[in-house]
Structures are given as structure tokens and as C-alpha cells.
Image (cartoon, grey):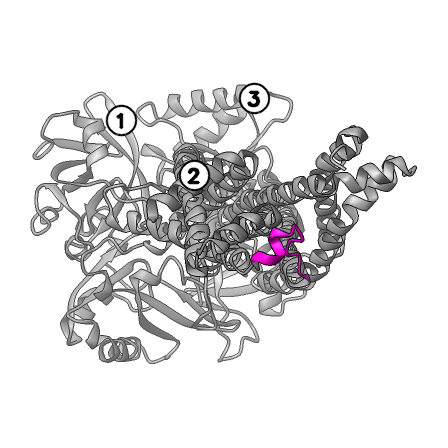
Amino acid sequence: MFRLNLKISLRNLWKNKGYTFINIGGLGLGLASCIILLLYVSYEWGYDKQAPDFEKTYLVYNHQQTSAGIFSHPTTPGAFAAEVKQNIPGVYRAARFGYPKDGLITEGQSSFRKTGVYVDPDFLKIQGYHFISGSASSALAQVNAVILTRSLAKSIFAEEDPIGKTVTLDKKDALMVTGVIEDLQKNTSITFDYLLPWSLLEKQDPFFKNQSWNNNFCMTLVQLESTDLFTKADAQVRQLYNKHESDKVSEFTLYPIAKWHLYNNFENGKQVGGKITQVKIFLLLAFCILLIACVNFMNLSTARSEKRGKEVGIRKTIGASKKALISQFLLESLLMSVCGMLLAIVCIELSLPYFNRLLGTGLEVNYNDLRYWVLLIGLTLFTGIVSGSYPAFYLSSFEPVIVLKGIGKSSKSAISVRQILVVSQFVFAVCLMICSIVIYQQLNFIKNKPVGYQKDQLVEIQVQGNMLKNAGRLMLTKDKLLQSGAAKQVSFFSMSITDGGNNTFDVRWPGKSANDRTLFDFRSTGYDLVATLGAEMIDGREFSPKHADSTNIIINSAAAKAMGLKKPVGSIINWGGTNLEIIGLVKDIVIQSPYKKVDPMIIYYNLEEVNYILVRLDSKIPVNAALQKINAVMESIEPGFPPVVKFADDNFEAKFQNEKVLGTIANWFGGFSIFISCLGLFGLALYMAEHRKKEVGIRKVLGANPIQILTLLNKDFMRLVGIANLIAFPLAYLIIQHWLEGYSYRIELTLIPFFIALVLSVCIALLTISMQSIKAVRANTVDALKYE
């Protein structure tokens, strides 16, 4: 029986090639879109879950009381790891690690600028890295040790064994390779090319030996003996700060490492989501696109019911049961689902490299993973059964006496279900259109929001080698850059202009209340900062060689407001026990995130603490020529260090990666959903044109003009598209309003996105339907009526 059903199914599919190709194309594109989105969801969901015991691993978060609320961040005092390991029962391991840092690794004549992280020895055991050479227990036992990833080891030593060989860090520290580990997966939050012992950092800078509980400068990982001990351990961790400090303004908590990437947003000390919202949207999007493809199949199958009616009648007459007919039609849909899956696999293989480049991800298909095959088979069966179930039950319910008379079954219920399915397709497609437009508007709004300085033509050069903590060499570099003609203005900054960090509560001013906990950012700089940035000096002056500015500071407007200083220039404040005079008031500069309000900032003069040279390019010189001159100057001053030059606007642009990914996926897969919907609409229009060709012929004979006939053929479809828009508008409004609530600075929602979506959906639908309607209008009337 199965062989007979299979033969009939194949014959029917081949006989109706046009509909078969439309169905397979729609199912294939829907399955490909669904699988790519599921791969992305799986990739994001797998973040920081590579370690064997990741369930027992926690990142320590610090929740500090400020005047603006609780400020949550994953930094701790240096003494925290040892304290928690020694004094809290259930803690198996604890390790400090630092933020990734670029360094120049040199071996012989070869140099490589790579990212390194300083870590405690226990960090290796917590993370469970796979060692190709060396071991986790001894690799960081020496102060001059270094662990390389496989890729970096191969780049430096080719096929030689690197263990025991020496490399140099930043032309200063000779390090011995004590271990080689496998390359990290891309979906990990702690990324690096090499690891260094924390003891080396303490040797390089004694500040990191600081044991004060008021200085937060590292991150800490804690591994428990069992997840059952979390509640007790977390309760004791929360009391650690109060044990050492009496002000009770900080509280530490254990936060699962597996949640760090997806649940990283905190408000007033409480976790309020994060990227998980975006992942959930993509998961919903995956199945919605697949359902659109299934709806296409249902629509086309029920629309062609009259052609299959006689077949059903004859088979019922000769004894076929309803169950046998349902099996026959489900087998046809499963066959098309299998063909669609094969097409989807081809599409995935062709498009995945492109999406990885577009999204900056490492999505891959692992054909050796049983779970992937379970997913493919599951989706194939799901698609085949869902898309074929309604047509199977609908067609098998035909009465033989009726259909064999040629009357057919065109009940109002069948038409209404088909209309509902068409409307549901376009509701989803229109929602995606509106969301894509609003995401684009929000992204442009944030990008073009005033940031307090001119991003264009501003470059940052990393301070390296002998320039570090060398005021004379820095000033020499500034003079040479200005003399080169490439630079219009040059200054210095302690951090990248787009990086956050470096803040303090220890600021006092006249009238400050005892309970005030205002958090101030602080940055060191040189001369001409405001002029180089293109910022606005509201009052006072910049630092100048004409003045002794060692005890002078510049503040921003947010700092003046926080301190209640209406005329701050000339005022004296105290920071860290030192009295400082405010000599300048600068308009707020967006330093860290364009999504949040500008924090109060103190800027002071100290060239020994700067890490970046800021250069305002001369607009009269082509950018490439200016960069060549800058590189030449930097190479002449530090010949052993390749210059690291970055544009400020590129760094600023990187802040919008999440929105770019969301917008890109919404655009692409929104387009796919519209295309799939149009495939179904095209198939229905094809059926409609064929089904009504006699009616069109008669109307033409009776004098109907082409416009009247086109209106007749198109109006029902356009009515459905209009209804879809009416349903989609409030739905999209609720979704977008919820998304926009996550931004402090956001656009005002207008009617423009809804109008654009309406026009686009109507035009696309009209164009799709008219392709067949025009063909029907142009058909020879004699051919349409000769069967009568």
C-alpha cells in the first residue's frame, strides 16, 4: 500500500510541476530561515557554557549604592578571591582575572599584536581549557610564564614545539611558554590569545597588590563544590564588604557565568534582562517564518481542491477509506517537506559564511552532531505534518456523489480558512516591516545624537613602548605629529574616548550632604583636549603650559549639576584628600554609552597616566595620506612597535552591534517572510486566473475593459492585505513600544513606519497578483471559451 501511495504522490507532484516548485521553494526557504535562526539562538544560548563545570561557576557582581541608585558591575577588590576561598565554606576555587589587554608579542624578528589576560592559576582549572601542551596545575606557577592558544603558537613557532621557548611582551618582559591550549570558541565572553600570571601584573605595577576593599580593579570567578551550596555561599558573600568596611555601601553577589552574556542588564541592583530578549525574538521569528511556509502549502493545496475532487470521489467509490486518503495526502506533503529540507540544506551551506561575516558570529553546521540530525528530521516531520494536515482532512472529507457530478466542494468554511491563512501571513510580514523600519530609525537617532565632540576626522593612537609614563617623549610625539601636517590638534587621554571605567565616590565639595553618593568618572589628559575633541568649553580654560595645572581640574556639566555649582570655575573641591581648583567647565561628552545619561566627570592633567594620543586630522589632507604620515611619525619614535591607529567614529559605531544584528536579521528574514508570502499569493493568483478564465472571457465579450477585469481579479486579495495591515498595526505598536522602553534616549513613534509598511505591502502584493491577472486579461478569449 505504501508503494502505491508513494507512486501516486510522485506522479501527482510531477504532473503539477508549477505548484510543486512553488511549494518546495516556499518550504525550502522557510526551513532554511528557521534553521539559520535556530543556529543563531543555539550559538547565543551556548555562551560561556564550554567549561565542564560551568553550572558551578559564578562571576562576582558588585552592587554599589550611588545617589542615582544602585550601580552594578562585575569588578571586585583584589583581595576578594583569597578571602572568599579561605573563609566561605563550599567555595572550591576562586580566581582573579583582568580585562583583555592588547600587547605586542615578539619572537626573533616576528611581532604579533594580540589580546592577553592576566589570571590567577585557579582560573585555568575553573574554565577547564584543553591543554595541548603543558598542564593547568603548573602552567602559571612562574611569574614569567605565558600560555598561548593553538593559533598564536602556530603563528609564532609554525610546527615547532613552543614549550620552553621565550617570547617578549611589549619589548620588555621575557616570557617562557609553559602551555598551549585549544583555540577558544567564539561564543565565550572571556576572549584572549594568551594568558599571563596575575603575579606578573603585580610585578609590573605595584598598584595591583592593593588590598583595600574600596578599590575595584579586577573580576573574580568563583567555583562551588556543588550548586546546592549556592544559597548559603551567596548569603555569606553578600556580607563580605561589611566585614571589612563600615560604610555599608557595597554588596557582592554570585552570578552564574552562564547568564553573564544573555542576562547582563541591571537596574537598581536587580537583573532586568539583556540580550535574552533579542534571542527570544529570533526564536519566535524562526517558527513564525516556518509557519508562513506551511500556510502557503495549506492555501495552495485547498485552492486546488477541485482538481483533486474527482480523484477523491473515485478512490472512495472503489473502497478507499478516509484514513487511507489522509495518509496519501500527508505522504505528499512529507515528500515535499523532504525536498524542501534538501533545498534548505543547500541554502544554509551557501548562506552561512555570509551571515557569519555579517553578524560577526561563528555559526556552523556540525553533521557529526546527532542533535543536528534530530533537529533536521524533527523539522521535516513537523513541517510535513503541519502543512499537510488541514489539506489532508479537508480533501478526504469530499462526498463522492457530489464531486463526481463536477459540483466540487467550495464551502464558505474552506474559503474563510484560506482567507484567514493569507491574512495571518501578511500580519506577520507587515509587523516585521514596521519593526525593521523603527529599528533603523532608532539606530540612526542614537548615531546622530549629539555626543559633545566631533567624531569625524578624530583618531586614537595607542601609547606604547618608551612613551608610556614618559611626559617628555609624549610631548616630542605631539610636536612631530603637528609638524607632519597630518594633525590639526593633538592631545592625550587616559582611556579610549568610547571606553568606560575609572570612577570614584571620593569627591567632596562645599555643601555636600553626608548621604551623597555621587559617582564621578575621572580621566587624565594633556594640553588642548577640548580643542582636539571639538568639544565646547562653556566657561574657563583648558590646561596650558603657561600655568601650573597639577592641582587644577576641568569638570563637565553633569559634575557641576551633581555638586550644585552654578558657577563652578574658581571653586575648590577635594578629591582623595587633595584640594583641587576647577579651571574649566566643558559641555557633557558622551564617553561610554550613547544609551545612558552622561555621568559626572573630572579631567585632570597628568601625562604619566595617559594611554592614548588623540589626533584631529587636518581636513585639507586626504585621510590616507594623513594616516601614512602619522604611521611614519609613530614608527620613527617607537620603531619596534607597529602603530595602533583607530578612528573614533569606528569605535563609536561598535557600540551599536546588538542593534545592527537585530536590524540585519529583521531586514533579511523579514524580506524572506514577505517573499514566502508572495510565493503563496502568486500560487493563489495562478489558480484564480486559471479558475476564472471563462468568466474573464465572457466579461471581455460583454465589453468589460482591462482595468475593470484587473480590479475584479485583484480586489479580494487586496482586501485581505488591507485587513492584515489593520491587525498588524496595533500588534507592531505594542512590540515596538516594549522594545523602545529599554532605551533612555529613544525616538517618538510616528505614523511614518506604519504608512511605509502599508504602501510596501500593498505594492508588493499588487505586483505579485497582477503578474497573473494581466496574463489572464491578455489571454485569447476564444481559447478561454472554446470548451463550452
| Secondary structure category for the residue under label 2 | helix
Spatial separation of the CA atoms under disc 2 and disc 1: 63 Å
Residue stretch rendered in magenta on the structure: 400-411
Asked whether 451 or 187 is in front, the reply is: 187
Asked whether 400 or 408 is in front, the reply is: 400
Image mark for residue 10: 2
Query: What residue is shown with label 1?
Result: 111
Mark 3, mark 1: which one is toward the viewer?
1
Q: Is residue 305 above or below residue 728?
A: above
- Residue shown at 35% from the left, 62% from the top: 259
Residue 463 in sight in this render: yes
Query: Going by the image, does 34 lie left or right of 405?
Result: left
Query: What residue is shown with label 3?
Result: 485
- Residue shown at 20% from the left, 76% from the top: 228
Residue count near mark 2 (Cα–Cα under 10 Å), binned few <14, some 14–19, many ≥20? some
In percent of width and height, residue 605 lies at: 48, 48
Residue count near mark 1 (Cα–Cα under 10 Å), binned few <14, some 14–19, many ≥20? many
| Secondary structure category for the residue under label 1 | strand
N-terminal-most mark, 2 or 1: 2
In percent of width and height, residue 711 lies at: 83, 44
Mark 2, mark 1: which one is toward the viewer?
2
